[in-house]
Image (cartoon, rainbow, N blue to C red):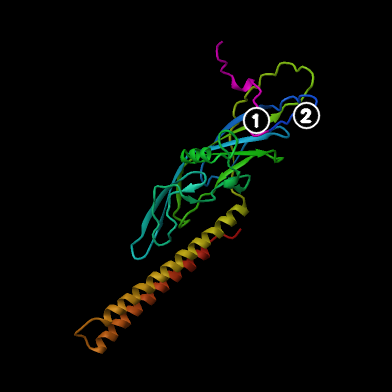
């Protein structure tokens, strides 16, 4: 018998549902039919992407795949300013969690909360394997392939996806690439004790054009708050670096031989004046950036 290439015409049982048998008679099996299937590309920091609204009581099978690349500039003491780059999938990135030594480890081990589903980040306890279970071997195989699967019940509103990526200095942060999201909406077929008619063919509609919504004022305000936190950490790190360099220079002056006390005092004063000037410039740049932030 030839293989039927139309998988959506069959009634497919959901693997994560159990149908108990009642005593005295056999209950008809629980089956779910495909209502629609849709695939979208989610780009980082480009607003929200809406999926079509499913039938009432639908269950959504979500599969997220792919990786993105990102980079930003930083100034880890005692080195000069460097550009840090890395890769990320929907849950993990490859940047080492070390503020003074950020680097690309090549291993997807650092957890992030960039990818949002209906405004919420993905929790690891909500992930499923390809069989709809939480088998650790299946989850490990999916993570190695950068595949993450979710089962979401009807939330009463369309599914919304977004990737709000930020790492290190948000002003120099850049990301490229995209994630691919595939969604299958299934609805429960009615149970009938009598013989059912042949199931109807489920026609998969053409994908409607993606709807990209620009960030709302609340989204922009939240992003500004995150940027302020990052700038504050960077400011204190630079202050610490200047203080450490000043201390090292003073210690080196004390160890110099063949100089009089007046000469050493002059050198010490020059080092202190230079450090004070660097701190003043850093504070002035910080105040200038803060004054340029747009108030919504």
Q: Is residue 77 visible?
A: yes
* Mark number displayed over residue 22: 2
Identity of the residue drawn at 42% across and 54% down: 96
16 drawn magenta: yes
Q: Position of residue 175 (x, y in %)?
A: 46, 47
* Extreme-bottom residue of the structure: 261
Query: Could you say whether the residue bearing mark 2 is in a helix, strand or loop?
Result: loop
Identity of the residue drawn at 78% across and 29% down: 22
Asked whether 234 or 186 is in front, the reply is: 186
* Residue under numbered circle 1: 14
Region in magenta: 1-17
- Chief SS of the magenta region: loop
* Extreme-top residue of the structure: 1
* Extreme-front residue of the structure: 24
* Extreme-left residue of the structure: 258
User: Which one is closest to the eye, mark 1 or mark 2?
Assistant: 2
């Amino acid at each position: 018998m030839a293989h039927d290439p139309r998988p959506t015409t069959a009634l497919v049982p959901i693997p994560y549902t159990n149908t108990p048998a009642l005593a005295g008679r056999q209950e008809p099996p629980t089956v779910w039919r495909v209502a629609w299937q849709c695939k979208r590309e989610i780009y980082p920091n480009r607003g929200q992407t809406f999926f079509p609204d499913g039938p009432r009581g639908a269950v959504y099978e979500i599969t997220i795949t792919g990786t993105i690349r990102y980079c930003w500039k930083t100034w880890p003491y005692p080195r000069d300013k460097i550009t840090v780059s890395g890769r990320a999938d929907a849950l993990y990135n490859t940047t080492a969690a070390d503020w003074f030594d950020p680097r690309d480890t090549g291993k997807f081990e650092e957890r992030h909360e960039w990818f949002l589903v209906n405004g919420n980040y993905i929790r690891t306890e909500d992930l499923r394997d390809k069989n709809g279970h939480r088998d650790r071997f299946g989850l490990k195989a999916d993570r190695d392939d950068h595949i993450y699967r979710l089962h979401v019940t009807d939330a009463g509103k369309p599914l919304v996806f977004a990737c709000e990526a930020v790492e290190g200095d948000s002003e120099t942060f850049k990301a490229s690439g995209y994630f691919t999201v595939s969604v299958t909406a299934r609805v429960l077929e009615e149970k009938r004790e009598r013989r059912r008619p042949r199931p109807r063919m489920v026609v998969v509609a053409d994908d409607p054009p993606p709807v990209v919504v620009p960030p709302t004022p609340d989204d922009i305000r939240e992003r500004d708050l995150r940027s302020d936190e990052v700038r504050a950490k960077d400011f204190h790190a630079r202050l610490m670096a200047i203080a450490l360099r000043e201390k090292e220079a003073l210690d080196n002056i004390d160890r110099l031989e063949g100089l009089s006390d007046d000469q050493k005092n002059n050198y010490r004063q020059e080092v202190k004046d230079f450090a004070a000037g660097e701190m003043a410039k850093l504070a002035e740049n910080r105040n200038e950036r803060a004054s340029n932030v747009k108030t919504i």
